[in-house]
Image: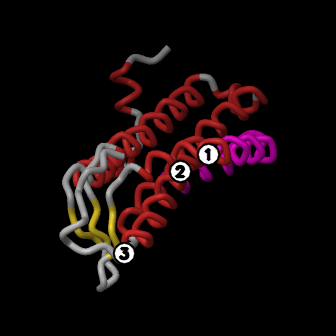
Amino acid sequence: MPSLFQIVAQTPVWVWPLLLLLLWLGLSGLRSRVVPIWRPALLPLIGLGVSLTGVAQSGSPTLALASWLAVLLLAFGPGYALGRRRAVRLLPEGRLELAGGWFGLVFGLSVFFVRYALGVLFGVLPALRGDPLWVALSAGIGGAIAGVGLGWLAAILVRARRNASMTDQTFQMRGMG
């Protein structure tokens, strides 16, 4: 079993800027802000892309895709419920007024650390890449991440559209999702 130092030393260099990007996106989400409508989609799309990459690199892509899709559909609902808690409003110029919350930071770090842990596991025990249980489990984890992220995004976009007619006096920045 490699040491923690060996694991970190053998990590590809591109991983660390990705971690910094996820941290920056997550920390910027802690405060209320006005953002372009596409900005809240960044973390869910990163989660989707990373999870689909895991499916494509799987030892059994068909099994991985089936597991990924099944868990994505199950995780969409909880993600949607989290997004419904976020105070958000579509402004007349097409930007979003979005309350601060912990979702982005927790989500981004979850994407990173789950994929990192699975990468280390499959690097140390490469035979697991072809084991059906591990294929389904790792793809399911990716599906959960993608489902929660996409559900959250769908909920805030629906909520923003519904709240678009609210006036500045009635909009309260109260969300924690």
Asked if one can make out residue 130 in the rendered structure from this viewpoint, the answer is yes
Q: Earlier in the sequence, mark 1 or mark 3?
A: 1
Q: Amino acid at mark 2?
A: Val
Residue at x 69% of width, y 28% of height: 134
Q: Secondary structure at mark 2?
A: helix
- Whole-percent x, y for residue 161 in the image: 44, 72
Residue at x 80% of width, y 41% of height: 63
Examine the structure image and report whether residue 55 is included in the region drawn in magenta: yes
Q: Which residue is mark 2?
A: 50
Q: CA distance from mark 1 to mark 3?
A: 37 Å
Asked if the residue at tag 3 contacts the one at tag 1, i.e. Cβ–Cβ closer than 8 Å, the answer is no
Q: Which residues are magenta?
A: 46-71
Q: Which residue is mark 3?
A: 164
Q: CA distance from mark 2 to mark 3?
A: 32 Å
- Whole-percent x, y for residue 165 in the image: 35, 77
Q: Which residue is mark 1?
A: 54
- Whole-percent x, y for residue 132 in the image: 78, 30
Q: Residues within 10 Å of mark 1 (few under 14, many from 20)?
A: many
Asked if the residue at tag 3 contacts the one at tag 2, i.e. Cβ–Cβ closer than 8 Å, the answer is no
